[in-house]
Amino acid sequence: MSDRIIKVNELVGQKLGQLMLQELELPLGTLITITSVSVSPDLSSAKIFVSVMPTEQKKEAMKILINGRGNLQKLLGQEIVLRRTPKLIFLIDEIGEKVAELDRLLDNLQ
């Protein structure tokens, strides 16, 4: 991965995180965290991996993200100057849950 794409990933994640805090109305006690961003080399799309706490709110959080995607994309385009604003694709990052499950299994072995 080129240095430019790495920097774009970081910038998109940072700005999008700020926009999500400002623009999205989440249910009380729900937290969405961007865990990683993967922008395509041609800047046409960006996969945004998120974790949701509590995990029971994943479906509701994804609905909110998908419904707000157009507005977030527009605002992101105003915040950062790129050849094109990437289409946002939100995905749940399951790694945190898998790590917690492994920890529980390892604790049960001892």
Image (spheres, helix red, strand yellow):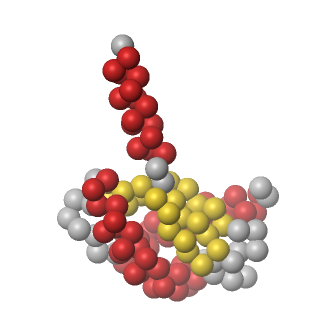
* Residue 2 found in image quarter: bottom right
- Above or below 49: residue 78: below
Residue ID at (38%, 17%) = 109
Quarter of the image for the N terminus: give it.
Answer: bottom right
Could you tell me residue 49's position as x and y percent? 51, 59
> Would residue 7 be found to the left or right of residue 94 on screen?
right
Could you tell me residue 77's position as x and y percent? 58, 83
Question: Along the line of sight, which residue is nearer the eye, 39 or 13?
Answer: 39
Could you tell me residue 61's position as x and y percent? 34, 67
> Would residue 11 be found to the left or right of residue 43 on screen?
left
Q: Residue furthest right?
A: 2
Question: Along the line of sight, which residue is nearer the eye, 22 or 87?
Answer: 87
Residue ID at (41%, 73%) = 65
Quarter of the image for the C terminus: give it.
Answer: top left
* Residue 48 found in image quarter: bottom right
- Above or below 52: residue 40: below
* Residue 78 found in image quarter: bottom right
